[in-house]
Amino acid sequence: MKHPFVFLITILFCSKIKAQNSNDIEKIGYLLTDALFYSEKYIIPMTDAAVYQASSGWVLSPKKKEKWEVTLGIHTNVFFVPNKDRDFQIKNSDFQFFEIEGASTATVPTALGNNDPHFLIGEIGGETVRFKTPEGVNQETIIYPYFQASVELPYGFEFIGRYSPKTKLKKGNYQVYGAGLKYNLSQHFKNWEIKKIHLAVAGIYSNADVSFDFLDVNTAYGNLGINRINGIVDTWHLDLLFSKEFKNLDLNGNFILNYSTFNYLVNGPKGSIEEIIPVQQIINELLTRIEKDKINTIFEITGIYHINKFALQSSFAFGKFANLNFGVQYQF
């Protein structure tokens, strides 16, 4: 029996290509189903990683500062790309339209992987459809800079904001921004303050946007227009922070609980096939099927060295992934 999605495509658009073989519309339906399968395997490792990249180094210190004190910082984030998330296996039985050129199985890169190409082939309208599998970032680490600012508010609250310019990766782009509110808890325990022990809780929101070149597919009816894919990750962070002061050195421990939502879409110039089938709209509707909310727990250790009004910060976050963060901050 036909896949229900393929059957719907055939019914809706067969009348628009009366001069052509209606069987080709069925094949296009299978092609789009294959594209959905491939997109899930390709992009999800990168958006999972984006949660970690957006989680680190938010709070300089849980300590309560002077009211209206402003801190500005420049940071560099270093994400270590794990080997297990750099590629995935495909086989001909995974596809309804495509097959692997010259092989029955292949190892292909995810968005976190290398740039080793393989080719998938099919046939529509008497013409061969052939395209190279998408490449990954091909980097051992993903590095991006960002700016951060905070201002101490009354009653032990602190507002924090973060923004990174769009960072060009080898085969994609990455950008993150966000804001949060920290509250100092140790102000209510004078013995802790005397011992230079500080405790705080923070609620933070971040938005990460990653984009990659995707499936540049040409058919007898024109280009499909799915050659760019975006993953947008909205994350709500709950941080519990602890620190101990040692003269000019602070040591912080941070437990982070994340709740993330994911949105995937293909975009860029629409293909000429749009005159027959609204491919981008169909693919974007299909992509909602792989959008699953996720919860992560992350642990972070931070060391901060104070030099007058400057603070040198280094944070290491770990859990499913590992992430390193360096920062230089100035306290006004």
Image (cartoon, rainbow, N blue to C red):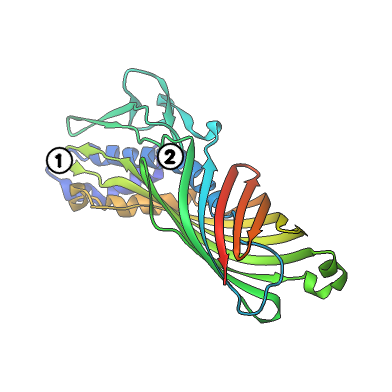
Residue 241 falls in image quadrant: bottom right
Residue at far bottom of view: 154
Nearer the viewer's eye, disc 2 or disc 1? 2
Q: Is residue 10 visible?
A: no
Looking at the figure, which quarter contains the N terminus? top left
Q: Which numbered disc flags the more N-terminal residue, 2 or 1?
A: 1
- Horizontal arrangement in the rendering, residue 49 relative to residue 1 (left or right): right
Measured Cα–Cα span from mark 2 to mark 1? 36 Å
Residue 43: quarter of image: top left
Q: Is residue 12 left or right of residue 145?
A: left
Q: Nearer the viewer, residue 79 or 260?
A: 79
Q: Which residue is at the far right?
A: 191
Check the picture and name the quadrant holding the C terminus.
Answer: bottom right
Visible residue check, residue 37: yes
- Residue 292 locus on image (x, y percent): 54, 51
- Which residue is identified by label 2? 111
The residue at 23%/52% (across/down) is: 270
Near mark 2 (Cα within 10 A), the count class, few <14, some 14-19 or many ≥20, is many
Q: Is residue 142 above or below residue 262?
A: above
User: What residue sits 33% from the left and 42% below the top?
Assistant: 214
Residue 317 screen position, x and y as percent: 63, 48
Residue in front for this viewpoint, 61 or 231 = 61
Amino acid found under the numbered disc labelled 1 = Gln
Question: Which residue type carries mark 2?
Answer: Ala
- Residue 327: x and y in percent read 55, 55
Q: Is residue 164 above or below residue 283?
A: below
SS of the residue under disc 1: loop
Q: As drawn, which residue projects farthest toward the left? A: 19
Q: What residue does disc 1 label? A: 20
**Counting other residues with Cα less than 10 Å from the Cα at mark 1, is it few (<14), some (14-19), or many (20 or more)?**
few
The answer to which of 326 and 265 lies nearer the viewer is 326
